[in-house]
Amino acid sequence: MYDIIIIGAGPAGLSAGIYATTRNKNVLIIEKTAIGGMIKDVSEVTHFLSTLNHESGKDFALKLVDQAERYNLNVTYEDVEEVNLIGDVKTVKTKKNTYKSEKIILATGTRPRVIEVEGEKNVLENYFALNASKDGKNYKGKDVYVIGAGDGAVKEAIFLSNIASRVFIIHELSELNCICEFRDKLAATDNIEVIYNTRMTKLYGEEKIEAVELQNIKTGENIKFEAPGAGVFVYAGVVPNTEIYKQIDMMDGFIPTDESMETEIYNVFAAGDIRNKNVRQIGTAVSDGIIAGIAASK
């Protein structure tokens, strides 16, 4: 039995944990994989105060691990399978244990949106939907295709341009969705080409990519490009990790809260990217976590 259970150990969950633990609450943080959430997979953390120049997501996550240890946060690594949020005592079931608490903070974040391309299963293990900071080194001197044109996609494309021979950004719309800073950096990078009004429809090859097929959305024309050993990195948006919270009424899969981060269910809070809100950044996740941690501790 705990005072507060926090599900998720990204910036939101850890912030909530620190602020609740330092208020003398008995807190358990349940994390499925590793501290840091999606941020640990980005090539570079940008815009967040106090980060170092060109600080990688992996290094940023290591700082979160260090901070969790300094505050003696109680983190267990388990996969949550079921939750019951109704009543005075909430329950969280994992494959190993059942935990109980008076209050719960949901901070499970988001995951990359999956897209389907014909032929991807032949090359999925090694050449499709990869992590740029982890796998980019495998494409030195080769072509790389980045699907998506938001901040994350363009930032990772710029990172990959320092490794790959050529980087092609595949975008279904007629203009980029990213901020001006990344537009300017993109314009100054010679080996990146943006292909607008286009989607990737097919991958050719067994075990590794030999060619890709692109379709012009406006004309319907399909064009095949030879691309031996190329990589495909997908940054086509995110999906909230909220499927198990069936007792909460969602808005497009995201969780509505009030200003204290409390949901429609008494003593159940939500923080970070799973919240229904307009801005999803490290800074807003940390802010949500702080507010939820303080509110749940009262």
Image: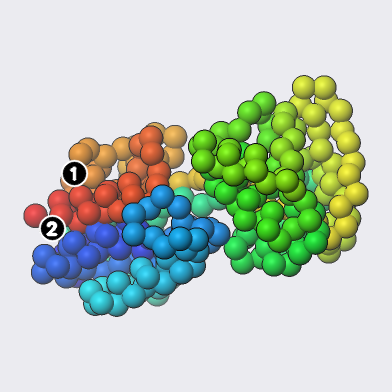
Residue plotted at (42% across, 72% down): 62
Residue plotted at (74% across, 35% down): 195
Q: Do we see residue 51 in this rendering?
A: yes
Which element type, helix, strand or loop, lies under badge 2?
helix
Image height of 236 relative to 80, above or below? above
* Residue 160 horizontal/vertical position (percent): 67, 56
Q: How is the image coloured?
A: rainbow
Residue annotated with mark 1: 260
* Residue 217 horizontal/vertical position (percent): 76, 26
Q: Amino acid at mark 1?
A: Ser
Quadrant of the drawing holding the N terminus: bottom left
Q: Kindly report the distance in space between the C-alpha atoms of the residues bearing marks 1 and 2.
A: 11 Å
Residue annotated with mark 2: 297
Quadrant of the drawing holding the C terminus: bottom left
Give the side of residue 163 with respect to residue 278, left or right. Answer: right
* Residue 70 horizontal/vertical position (percent): 25, 77
